């Protein structure tokens, strides 16, 4: 596993829930991905996660993409609901995420993480590869059941056992033709308060929360590395 792959895996912290596209005015338009269609009605309510996400969810998709150094990647992104545990003193439901991928430069990587959600949909924190674990959180706010295009909010500010701080937010962007992008963005700060990396996960969804596509992008400022991958459900 080379340094670039390690950098990407490190920036996956606190994002197993999981960009996106801009909207436009009326009529036919083109989004930031080049998709042409009709902007979604801004009065439409969208579920931000699938209805069974915290009960009995499981999905696995193929992903592919590239980085800004000319390397290509392919792999598998998997999420599933786990058990009920106690995390930071609260009863929580586990959501387990696995990202497995290989790069054109010969690198191979596997990243496992577990996120912990309260019954009222607060992201309490996460554990991940290498023994990294959330040890405290502030400003933790429940993820709404539904939202409309243009809505946004903060999930929380998390400190891990290595002293790094991660701020995680969400927003809902236009996905065109009756769809929306649910976007989760994380900024990872070092012990001095400087941004080390940023990661964005997006899901193209129907109003009931059914996921159609996934995108993830990670940027590490220290080494100027940006990796983008995605796939269809």
Image (spheres, grey):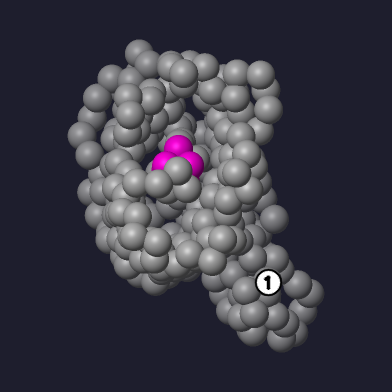
Residue drawn at (58%, 54%) of the image: 226
User: Would you name the residue on which mark 1 appears?
Assistant: 32
- 39 and 33: which one is in front? 33
Estimate how packed mark 1 is, as few (under 14), some (14 to 19) or many (20 or more) residues with alpha carbons within 10 Å. Answer: few
Residue visible at 62% across and 39% down in the picture: 222
Residue with the most extreme top position = 89
Dot 1 falls on a residue whose secondary structure is: loop
Quarter occupied by residue 179: bottom right
Residue 28 place in picture, x, y as percent: 71, 86
Q: State the extent of the magenta-drawn residues as a range.
A: 6-10
Is residue 32 highlighted in magenta? no
Residue in the foreground of this view, choosing between 88 and 43 = 88
Where's residue 1, x and y in %?
34, 46
Per the picture, the main secondary structure of the magenta-coloured stretch is helix
Which quadrant would the C terminus be assigned to in this image?
Answer: bottom left
Q: Is residue 110 visible?
A: yes
Residue 211 visible at all: no
The percent coordinates of residue 212 (x first, y second) are 42, 70
Q: Residue furthest right?
A: 25
Query: Total of numbered circles in the picture?
Result: 1
- Quadrant hosting residue 62: bottom left
Residue 205, compared with residue 163, is above or below; it is: below
Who's the residue at 48% across and 64% down the image? 71
Residue under the image location 39 percent in, 66 percent down: 104
Depicted 75 relative to depicted 17: above or below: below
33 left or right, relative to 212: right
Compared with 7, 165 (above or below) is above
User: Residue 111 location in percent, x, y?
Assistant: 32, 44
Query: Was residue 7 drawn as part of the magenta stretch in this picture?
Result: yes
């Amino acid at each position: 596993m080379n340094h670039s792959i390690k950098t990407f895996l490190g920036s996956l912290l606190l994002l197993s829930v999981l960009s996106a596209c801009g909207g436009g005015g009326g009529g036919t338009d083109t989004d930031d991905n080049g998709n042409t269609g009709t902007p979604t009605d801004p009065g439409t309510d969208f579920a931000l996660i699938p209805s069974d996400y915290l009960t009995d969810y499981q999905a696995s998709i193929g992903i592919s993409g590239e980085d800004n150094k000319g390397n290509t990647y392919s792999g598998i992104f998997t999420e599933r609901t786990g058990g009920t545990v106690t995390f930071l003193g609260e009863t929580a439901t586990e959501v387990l995420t696995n990202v497995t991928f290989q790069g054109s430069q010969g690198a191979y990587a596997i990243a496992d993480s577990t996120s912990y959600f309260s019954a009222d949909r607060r992201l309490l924190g996460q554990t991940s590869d290498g023994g990294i674990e959330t040890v405290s959180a502030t400003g933790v706010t429940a993820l709404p059941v539904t939202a409309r295009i243009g809505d946004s909010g903060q999930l929380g500010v998390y400190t891990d056992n290595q002293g790094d701080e991660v701020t995680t937010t969400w927003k809902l962007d236009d996905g065109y033709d009756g769809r929306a992008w649910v976007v989760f963005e994380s900024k990872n700060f070092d012990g001095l308060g400087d941004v080390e990396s940023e990661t964005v996960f997006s899901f193209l969804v129907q109003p009931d929360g059914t996921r159609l596509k996934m995108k993830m992008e990670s940027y590490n400022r220290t080494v100027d590395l940006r990796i983008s991958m995605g796939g269809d459900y």
